[in-house]
Image: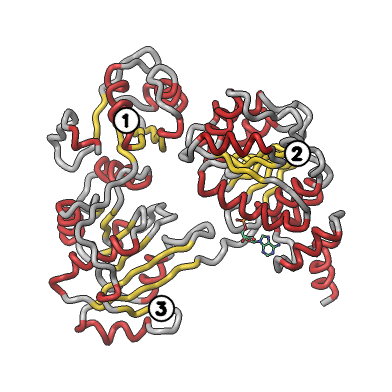
């Protein structure tokens, strides 16, 4: 009991050297005790140490660096004192929102987001009015720096949020160039969900004696919304399309009971304009690899699988899992839907059943599951689902000493394609799969099939549903 109380006291924000106003605000926000990453990192952050912390979305990481940033902010000094770099506009918006909540206790704090995809002019206008904290994506922040609209000469704290994602998205060159504008004497905080070697390399190149914090937190419980729809047997496919259109997730895993069915459903979806592939036991190993790479690098939207084929697949972070066929038992159900809603993100699970299966649904009925009629789905006249990326395959791989940097370098260098358009690069022994955002895929392909990588030209081709893909056809790329 005593031990418990001590731990509880240790986790109180009041043990930190924070202003009364900040403590009051945290209380108002309902932050009763520190989350593990806050408890481990905040004492060091507040002492101005560099910190590298392993933290996912949902761990309270934004408040960990946010409290640090706000604590040392000098509001009277009207210059940029903190910069938070994020991989995406969505994350930057989320971070800025959380910082504003935390800053409620401090008057007149100006927080500005600078992200790509938004018009440049208004950002320039806001910068003219001055800001204390900038939250942005590396490319756009760099653009303002290069044009002289933004100055980092008074920067005290630099934060890299979701650093692993920024590296995966090829932002390293831009990050380096942004940092070149910042003073050497600064605090640098790096947050990353995963710790691959390249993160440690980045840390040693931009941080000083950084404290490495890895909290052992149990996987946060998945937040999954579970829907059940009663469908007419011969309308299952059209209902599935309606469900996809209604919920509109980015990537979907559909479970069915047989190999033939998985093939048929994927083909029928494809014909209906919903990009899909099947995975089942009849595929050769190389076909399986092709399918999985395309699904995981976002150049295929729907994967239709049997339980056996999906076993052991490391597919997570799915937007939606669909039980096209009712699972055999509840354990299978739990296992299937556990692939959505990981890492603190909300998940979605949908199960179809026919009127003959109503008795089987009894197991599943409880108040947290929603049994809805198909009539609750939006009527969509014409729906297509096109994946955001295209996969280009190069006939060269590990055996040719190919590395992701070689390809990224060629694409962002000679080919002149911005790193943000380059997705995952998977290198196997003899083949390399390069995911490129659709709008840039044609340019990337034109370059890769002729340009040189490591002084050589490797044959390149693009995946299509049929073998006779006509890449010269305009429609293929749109
Ligand atoms: P984040 O991981 O930064 O995206 O934060 C996840 C959510 O947890 C946000 O809604 C925060 O407002 C909230 N949060 C952060 N720290 C705490 C805390 N100590 N107590 C309660 N909620 C928190």
Residue designated by label 3: 369
Q: From the viewer's side, name the closer residue of 173 and 116.
A: 116
Q: Is residue 276 visible?
A: no
Above-or-below relation of 329 to 22: below
Task: Determine contact: label 3, label 1, CB under 8 Å.
Answer: no
Residue shown at 71%/50% (left/top)?
66
Q: Quadrant of the N terminus?
A: bottom right
Secondary element at tag 1? loop
- Which labelled disc corresponds to residue 431? 1
Sequence-wise first label, 2 or 3: 2
Q: Is residue 165 left or right of residue 394?
A: right
Mark 2 vs mark 1, CA separation in Å: 40 Å
Q: Residues within 10 Å of mark 1 (few under 14, many from 20)?
A: some
When the figure is inspected, residue 283 is found, relative to residue 139, above or below; the finding is below
Q: Is residue 374 left or right of residue 30?
A: left
> Contact (CB < 8 A) between labels 2 and 1?
no
Residue 371 horizontal side relative to residue 35, left or right? left
Q: Which residue is mark 2?
A: 50
């Amino acid at each position: 009991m005593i031990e418990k109380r001590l731990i509880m006291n240790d986790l109180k924000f009041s043990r930190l050297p924070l202003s009364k106003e900040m403590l009051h605000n945290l209380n108002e926000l309902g932050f009763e005790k520190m989350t593990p990453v806050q408890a481990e990192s905040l004492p060091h952050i507040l002492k101005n140490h560099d910190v590298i912390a392993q933290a996912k979305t949902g761990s309270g990481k934004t408040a960990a660096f946010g409290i640090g940033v706000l604590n040392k902010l000098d509001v009277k000094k009207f210059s940029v004192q903190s910069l938070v770099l994020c991989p995406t506009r969505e994350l930057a918006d989320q971070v800025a929102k959380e910082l504003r909540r935390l800053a409620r206790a401090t008057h007149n704090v100006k927080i500005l987001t600078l992200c790509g995809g938004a018009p440049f002019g208004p950002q320039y206008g806001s910068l003219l009015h001055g800001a204390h904290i900038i939250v942005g994506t590396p490319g756009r922040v760099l653009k303002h720096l290069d044009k002289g609209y933004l100055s980092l000469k008074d920067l005290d704290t630099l934060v890299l949020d979701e650093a692993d994602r920024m590296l995966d998205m090829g932002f390293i060159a831009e990050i380096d160039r942004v940092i070149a504008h910042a003073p050497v004497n600064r605090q640098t905080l790096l947050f990353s969900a995963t710790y691959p070697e390249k993160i440690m390399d980045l840390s040693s190149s931009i941080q000083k004696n950084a404290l490495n914090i890895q909290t052992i937190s149990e996987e946060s419980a998945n937040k999954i919304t579970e829907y059940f729809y009663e469908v007419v047997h011969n309308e299952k496919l059209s209902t599935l399309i309606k469900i996809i259109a209604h919920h509109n997730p980015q990537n979907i895993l559909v479970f069915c009971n047989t190999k033939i069915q998985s093939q048929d459903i994927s083909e029928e979806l494809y014909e209906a304009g919903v990009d899909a592939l099947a995975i089942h036991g009849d595929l050769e190993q190389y076909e399986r690899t092709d399918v999985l790479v395309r699904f995981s690098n976002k150049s295929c939207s729907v994967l239709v699988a049997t339980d056996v084929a999906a076993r052991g697949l490391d597919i997570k972070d799915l937007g939606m899992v669909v039980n096209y066929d009712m699972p055999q038992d509840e354990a299978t159900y739990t296992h299937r839907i556990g692939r959505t809603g990981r890492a603190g993100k909300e998940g979605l699970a949908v199960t179809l059943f026919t009127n003959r299966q109503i008795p089987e649904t009894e197991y599943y009925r409880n108040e947290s599951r929603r049994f809805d009629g198909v009539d609750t789905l939006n009527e969509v006249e014409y729906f297509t689902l096109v994946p955001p990326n295209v996969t280009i395959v190069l006939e060269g791989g590990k055996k040719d000493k190919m590395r992701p940097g070689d390809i990224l370098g060629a694409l962002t260098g000679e080919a002149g394609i911005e790193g943000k358009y380059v997705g995952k690069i998977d290198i196997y022994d003899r083949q390399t799969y390069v995911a490129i955002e659709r709008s840039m895929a044609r340019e990337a392909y034109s370059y890769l099939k002729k340009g040189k990588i490591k002084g050589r030209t490797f044959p390149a081709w693009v995946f299509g549903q049929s073998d006779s893909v006509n890449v010269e056809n305009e429609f293929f790329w749109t």
